C-alpha cells in the first residue's frame, strides 16, 4: 500500500499544480517547525516600480546607463523609468555588480555607483542628512531606497516599491494556525523588510542578508533545532532551497531555483505552500 499512497499523492499534487519531486519532501513535511520565505519575488510580485526620484535628469540618465547592464529587478525598474521619460540609455564601461549591494561603472566618462546605503557610504560618499531622513521615512513604508553617487559625490536616490502578492497574508496566517513559525529573509534593508513583514503578519525577519549568506542563515536555524522549509524563486535562493529540509520553489522563478526545489509550485498562489505541506503530510499519514 505504501507506494500507492505516494503515487496517488504525487498525482493529486500534479493536478493542483504542486509538483512533488522527491520522497524526502514528504518526510520533511511531517517534522516541519518553520517556514522561511524569501521576500522579493516570493512574498512580493517581483516587479518593482520607481515611486520617487531625488535628483536631476542627468542623474537618472547615468543611473539608468549603469543599471541597463544589471540583471537585477531593481535595476530594470530604474531603466524602465528612464525610458518612460524619453531618456536615451548611455553606454557603460567597466561595469561591476556587487551582489546584494549595488553596481558601479563608468558612464559619459564619470564613475557612477548605484546601491544601498552601506554600499554607497563604504565607497566614501557622504550621503546628506536630509536625503538619509527621507530615505528612512520611505523605507518605513516598505519601499527600497537606492542611492546614486557620481564621481564620488552623492547625486540622488530612487525609492522603489514592489507590491505584496495578494495571497501572502492568508498563506502566512494559515501556516501559523498549523503551528508553524514563519520567517522572512531578504537582502533588503531592515526598515523596508520589517514594514513588508508587518503588512503580511510575519514577526521574525532576517534582513540585509547577502545572497551568498542565505543558505547559512537556513543552516543556523536548523542548528537551533528547527526543521525548515524554504520558499524562494531566485538564482540567489538555490543554495538555501538545497540546504533547507524542504525546498519549495516558485515555478515562475528562475530555472536554477526550480531545479533546487523538492516541491515546485506551478501557480503563483502562496496558498499552494500550505496545500503542498498539507498534501505531503496526508501522504505520510497513509504510509505510516
Ligand atoms: P533580495 O533579497 O530582496 O532579492 P538582493 O540580495 O538581490 O535582494 O539585493 C539586496 C540589496 O542590494 C537591494 O535591496 C539593493 O539595495 C542592493 N542592490 C542589489 N542589486 C542592485 C542593483 N543592481 N542596483 C542597485 N542596488 C542593488
Ligand atoms: Mg527573490
Image: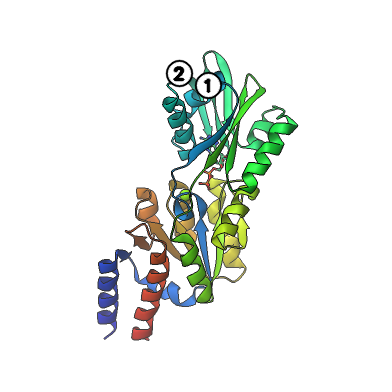
**Marking on residue 98:** none
Query: Which quarter of the figure is the N terminus placed in?
Result: bottom left
Query: Quick check: 105 above or below 195?
Result: above
Asked which secondary structure carries label 2, the reply is: loop
The residue at 34%/85% (across/down) is: 286
To which residue does mark 2 refer? 90
Q: Disc 2, disc 1: CB below 8 Å?
A: yes
The residue at 36%/75% (across/down) is: 279
Asked which secondary structure carries label 1, the reply is: helix
Query: Quick check: 6 above or below 209?
Result: below
For the residue pair 196 and 67, the one nearer the viewer reads as 196
Query: Quick check: 118 above or below 177?
Result: above
Res 145 → quadrant: top right
Residue 129 x %, y %: 74, 32
Residue 185 x %, y %: 56, 55
Residue 208 x %, y %: 61, 47
To which residue does mark 1 refer? 62
The residue at 45%/50% (across/down) is: 41
How crowded pointer 2 is (Cα within 10 Å; few <14, some 14-19, many 20+) is rated as some
For the residue pair 116 and 21, the one nearer the viewer reads as 116
Asked if residue 236 shows in the view, the reply is yes
How crowded pointer 1 is (Cα within 10 Å; few <14, some 14-19, many 20+) is rated as many
Amino acid at each position: 500500500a505504501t507506494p500507492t499512497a505516494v503515487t496517488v499523492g504525487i498525482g493529486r499534487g500534479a493536478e493542483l499544480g504542486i509538483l512533488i519531486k522527491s520522497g524526502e519532501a514528504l518526510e520533511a513535511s511531517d517534522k516541519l517547525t518553520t517556514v522561511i520565505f524569501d521576500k522579493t519575488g516570493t512574498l512580493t510580485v517581483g516587479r518593482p516600480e520607481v515611486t520617487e526620484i531625488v535628483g536631476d535628469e542627468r542623474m537618472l540618465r547615468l543611473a539608468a546607463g549603469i543599471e541597463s547592464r544589471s540583471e537585477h529587478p531593481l535595476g530594470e525598474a530604474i531603466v524602465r523609468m528612464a525610458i518612460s521619460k524619453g531618456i536615451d540609455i548611455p553606454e557603460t564601461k567597466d561595469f561591476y555588480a556587487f551582489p546584494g549591494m549595488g553596481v558601479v561603472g563608468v558612464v559619459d566618462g564619470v564613475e557612477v555607483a548605484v546601491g544601498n546605503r552601506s554600499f554607497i557610504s563604504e565607497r566614501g560618499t557622504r550621503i546628506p542628512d536630509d536625503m538619509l531622513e527621507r530615505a528612512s521615512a520611505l523605507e518605513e513604508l516598505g519601499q527600497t531606497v537606492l542611492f546614486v553617487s557620481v564621481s564620488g559625490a552623492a547625486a540622488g536616490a530612487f525609492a522603489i516599491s514592489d507590491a505584496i502578492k495578494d495571497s501572502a497574508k492568508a498563506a502566512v496566517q494559515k501556516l501559523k494556525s498549523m503551528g508553524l513559525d514563519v520567517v522572512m529573509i531578504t537582502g533588503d534593508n531592515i526598515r523596508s523588510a520589517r514594514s513588508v513583514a508587518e503588512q503580511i503578519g510575519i514577526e521574525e525577519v532576517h534582513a540585509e542578508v547577502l545572497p551568498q549568506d542565505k543558505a547559512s542563515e537556513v543552516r543556523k536555524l536548523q542548528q537551533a533545532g528547527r526543521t525548515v522549509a524554504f520558499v524562494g524563486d531566485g538564482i540567489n535562493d538555490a543554495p538555501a532551497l538545497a540546504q533547507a529540509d524542504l525546498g519549495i520553489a516558485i515555478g515562475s522563478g528562475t530555472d536554477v531555483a526550480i531545479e533546487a526545489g523538492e516541491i515546485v509550485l506551478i501557480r503563483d498562489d502562496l496558498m499552494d505552500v500550505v496545500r503542498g505541506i498539507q498534501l505531503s503530510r496526508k501522504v505520510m499519514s497513509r504510509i505510516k
